Amino acid sequence: MNVSKEQLIRDMEDLFGPERVLKTDLERLTYTYDSSFVSQQKEYLPDVVVCLNSTESVSRLMKYAYEHEVPVTPRGAGSGQTGGSVPLKGGIVLDLSTWKDVEVDDANMQVIVRPGVVHAELNKILAPYNLFFPPDPGSSAMATIGGMVGNNASGLRAVKYGATFQYVLGLEVVLPNGEVIKTGGVKSKALKSVSGIDLTRLYCGSEGTLGVITQIRLKVQPKAPYRGIMLALFDKLEDSAYTVLDVFKVGLIPSGIEILDDGAIRCANTFKPELKIPEVEAALFFEINGSKAAVEAEGAEIKAIVEKRCCSVEWATDPERMTQLWQGRQVIGSASARYMPGKTRVFAGEDVCFPISKVPEALRRIKMLSKEFDIPVVIYGHIGDGNMHTAPIMDPLNPVEVEKTVKIADAIHRLALEMGGTTTGEHGVGFSRAEYMEEEHGKALDVMWAIKKAIDSKGIMNPGKIWQLGRE
Ligand SMILES: Cc1cc2nc3c(=O)[nH]c(=O)nc-3n(C[C@H](O)[C@H](O)[C@H](O)COP(=O)(O)OP(=O)(O)OC[C@H]3O[C@@H](n4cnc5c(N)ncnc54)[C@H](O)[C@@H]3O)c2cc1C
């Protein structure tokens, strides 16, 4: 950075007006965190925060940052769990969360949004058109579309509908030197294209390291007219995972398959006592959607398969009961903080993904790690993809527990790699997973770095993410 902090703040106020600039200690403090455990362990204060909502102003900011070699960290809602939007090298945090324009093109089954639109808000806007944007993160009420593209987020319905990248048709991106490009075709409204190298895909999951995403053209889908929810209970944890494989073997793909282990069931019941889920080793939630006839037929078929291994099963198509049942899964993100008085749940090692054939073994081995490190781990998540949320329960004020949590998160990441999985199925790398990238990708990481250097030659875009600081 070849400008002082004081000068940087003055320049930002001159360029964008003081009302768009946050500079006090308190204002900047909130930007040292996202939802990750790793961001709670050390403060990374930005020198200044700038809140922008036009392509022209973002381009001006990037031209300034490029000239003065100031690090820039794009930020949506800060709900990420890997420290992705935390400014490791200070500089500017570019807050895009107030930029919320939406243009629905229902005739072409697409929508054009600015990066600050929140996922749940978008689906509310699409509902009257009977359309929806399917990736469905647990953080739907917080996550921005810019952040979802940045992290290539997915969620509860990824087993049938896939992740964010499958819906991104084109992007407007402000490059690190301030130039503006459109990916996916300058004027295109096409729903598919194989024209040229796929830069849109390159930016999905690039975590703010290749430029600032200022507009997103998304494919949307018609909403299925009918759905049903099944809750199946298992005395043995592994049987739940084998049941998922049984369902796939007959060629059925539910729109959601979620697991709660015994700890997660307990959390759900504590948080919402009216749920009264029996405290067995595991519960599976299946969501099936489609036409009424298809849902009823698939529901019956899946029930027959599930019954072979479970101790009890309930199938519901009544809207009120479905809401009650699905709530059992939806509350876990918050409910897991109530596992034990005096302790909380932190996001560390939290979204590993295993090959689906190895999930039964993975579940048991995570339980063994929990015993070994003496840190309770609540397991829940997207078992249909092998994507498990493993939530350590600990006291963040107790240094011994902090150390043990860091160690068990590391052991869980390494278990995923050892078993042929990945350290992150949906939350991204940020700086909490950067240390595993070499082992996970081998020489491919060098190619990723070559792309990064070609686009961001001065290394100003979100330094320290995906690649550890010092690589430059
Ligand atoms: C309770 C809870 C549940 C969650 N459940 C899920 C889940 O089911 N599935 C899932 O995938 N994630 C989940 N998450 C994680 C998180 O919500 C997602 O990763 C989400 O996509 C982040 O969006 P955000 O707006 O908060 O982005 P941020 O956290 O602000 O940013 C995320 C990354 O994107 C980059 N970025 C943000 N905006 C831009 C932009 N305009 N241009 C370029 N880069 C940008 C940032 O630099 C950063 O690297 C959950 C989080 C919480 C707290």
Image (cartoon, rainbow, N blue to C red):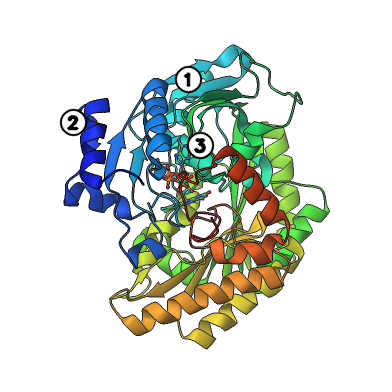
Q: Which residue is labeled 2 in the image?
A: 18
Residues at marks 3 and 2, CA–CA distance in whole angstroms: 24 Å
Is the CB of the residue bearing disc 3 within 8 angstroms of ligand 1?
A: yes
Would you call the spot at circle 3 few (<14 residues within 10 Å), some (14-19), or many (20 or more)?
Answer: many
In what element is the residue under mark 3? Answer: loop
Q: Is residue 199 above or below residue 33?
A: above
Mark seen at residue 246: none
Q: Residues within 10 Å of mark 2 (few under 14, many from 20)?
A: some
Q: Amino acid at mark 1?
A: Pro
Tell me, yes or no, if residue 20 can be seen here. Answer: yes
Of residues 414 and 94, the one nearer the viewer is 94
| Residue 132 falls in image quadrant | top right
Q: Is residue 386 left or right of residue 466?
A: right
Residue at the extreme front of the image, as rendered: 2
- Cβ at disc 2 under 8 Å from ligand 1: no
Name the residue nearer the viewer: 9 or 440.
Answer: 9
Disc 1 residue crowd, few under 14, some 14–19, many 20+, Cα 10 Å: few
Residue found 62% across the figure and 15% down from its top = 108
Q: Is residue 241 above or below residue 33?
A: below
Q: Nearer the viewer, mark 3 or mark 1?
A: 3
Which of these two is toward me, 114 or 223?
Answer: 114
Name the front one of labels 2 and 1: 2
CA gap between label 2 and label 1 equals 39 Å
At x 41% / y 73%, what residue is drawn? Answer: 393
Q: Nearer the viewer, residue 460 or 151?
A: 460
| The quadrant where residue 205 appears | top right
Residue indicated by mark 1: 128
Question: Do labels 3 and 1 touch, CB within 8 Å?
Answer: no
User: Mark 2 vs mark 1: which is more N-terminal?
Assistant: 2
Element under label 2? helix
Q: Tell me if I can see residue 310 in this picture.
A: no
Mark linked to residue 211: 3
